[in-house]
Amino acid sequence: MNVIGHRGAAGLAPENTAKSIKTAIDIGVDGVEFDIRTTLDGQLVLLHDDNLKRTHSLDKKISKLTLNHINKLLDLQGLSICTLKEALGITNTTPTFIEGKGGGWAKPLSKLLQNHPARQFATVISFNLGELQSFHSLSQGTKCMILENHNPMDALNNARIFNFDGVDINFWTLNPVFYWLCQRRKLDVILYTVNKPWIARIISILYPHASITTDRPDKMQFLRTNNQKNAQDKK
């Protein structure tokens, strides 16, 4: 089972920061996930919320600020907001799951990834079906996965209709029929956000080909160790 760090390693370092991404990679992950939003001047930065109130105690929307303004801000931990370019420089060859938040990110993301070395390691995910469709049409060589919080069958249908590569769903909604259909259609399955090892262990037994996203990749290393051992046994 693959272990993907959520917002870097959000349970160990401030989410969606360079520090969080580095922490996840240093611990050991099979992939890193983070959120992006579009600034007023069309730049892409790492942020989950549409405003800075929770992370920066500043009631300003990211879409109303330029990158120049954003570069001067520090979060409550004294860390700067990370741009997507900076984040991809850190992840390097680590598989990266870029969640597009809100709208307006499809074109700038496609342009950034077009000739970027990290493109081959990137997967774009989003709840915004329309924006994900737009990105998919602009950048067909990059993997895309639809996010869904309530009905996994909706995700499955959208993946089938729009030829996405997989689905990324709330782990509580996972069921055997859905999992079997995804396997049959050769769709990747990612489950978010799994933070309890005992739940992760059950999932790994029942749904061994699924991947999990977690705030605490340090607690999930036993899943990766088993994968490596199984791979060695097959040689």
Image (spheres, rainbow, N blue to C red):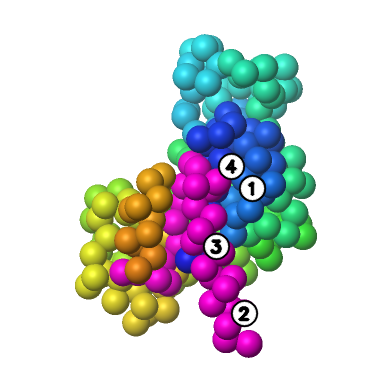
- The amino acid type of the residue labelled 2 equals Gln
Magenta span has 87?
A: no
**Residue 27 left/right relative to 163:** right
Give the distance between the C-alpha atoms of the residues marked 1 and 2, in whole angstroms. 21 Å
- The amino acid type of the residue labelled 3 equals Arg
Give the distance between the C-alpha atoms of the residues marked 2 and 4, in whole angstroms. 28 Å
Q: Residue at x 47, y 29 (%)?
A: 49
Q: Look at the image and give the residue range highlighted in magenta.
A: 206-235
**Residue 229 left/right relative to 155:** right
Give the distance between the C-alpha atoms of the residues marked 3 and 2, in whole angstroms. 12 Å
> Is residue 167 in view?
no
- Label 4 belongs to which residue? 8
Q: Residue at x 59, y 59 (%)?
A: 30
Residues packed near mark 4 inside 10 Å, few (<14), some (14 to 19) or many (20 plus) = many
Q: Quadrant of residue 17?
A: top right
Which x, y percent locates residue 128? 41, 48
**Residue 226 left/right relative to 121:** left
Q: Quadrant of the C terminus?
A: bottom right
Give the distance between the C-alpha atoms of the residues marked 4 and 3, in whole angstroms. 17 Å
Q: Nearer the viewer, mark 4 or mark 3?
A: 3
